[in-house]
Image (cartoon, rainbow, N blue to C red):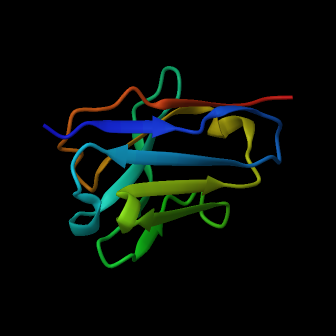
Amino acid sequence: QVQLVESGGGLVQPGGSLRLSCTASVSIFRIIEVGWYRQAPGKERELVAAITSGSSSKYADSVKGRFTISRDNARNAVYLQMNSLKPEDTAVYYCNRSPTPSYDWGQGTQVTVSS
């Protein structure tokens, strides 16, 4: 059973930055595609960024140019650097396998962008 743990969220003003981290209980990130998802209140969960085992990345149009996904295989971790944050980025952020999130969801990390 793979357990995912997200961290790094918080309250930030518009235009600010945060760096999210995701770790797994099993050393799997180096061999799978991993995605960062988010779910805002009243909305469906959406994929915002993904990184392949070969470190190719892709982004949702809404975050392209502002978010950067990266991985550290030695630490079995995946990160999401979020810059130029907007109020519409407010959501709970999760990591999971991409494009099909096949593991149990972690608790997520809350990101709130507000002045």
Where does residue 93 sit, x and y in percent of width and height?
Answer: 49, 37
- Identify the residue at image location x=27%, y=67%: 30
Q: Residue furthest front?
A: 74
Q: Quadrant of residue 1?
A: top left
- Identify the residue at image location x=28%, y=63%: 33
Where does residue 75 sit, x and y in percent of width and height?
Answer: 39, 59
**Image quarter (top left, top right, bottom left or bottom right) of the C terminus:** top right
Where does residue 41 sit, x and y in percent of width and height?
Answer: 52, 21
- Identify the residue at image location x=25%, y=36%: 3
Of residues 8 and 115, the one drawn nearer to the viewer in this rendering: 8
The answer to whether residue 77 is left or right of residue 12 is left
Q: Residue furthest left?
A: 1
Where does residue 86 sit, x and y in percent of width and height?
Answer: 74, 43
The answer to whether residue 107 is left or right of residue 88 is left
The answer to whether residue 58 is left or right of residue 12 is left
Q: Quadrant of residue 98?
A: bottom left
Of residues 74 and 49, the one drawn nearer to the viewer in this rendering: 74
- Identify the residue at image location x=73%, y=47%: 85
The answer to whether residue 2 is left or right of residue 9 is left
Number of numbered discs present?
A: 0
Compared with 111, 42 (above or below) is: above
- Please say whether residue 62 is visible from this viewpoint: no
Compared with 85, 105 (above or below) is: above
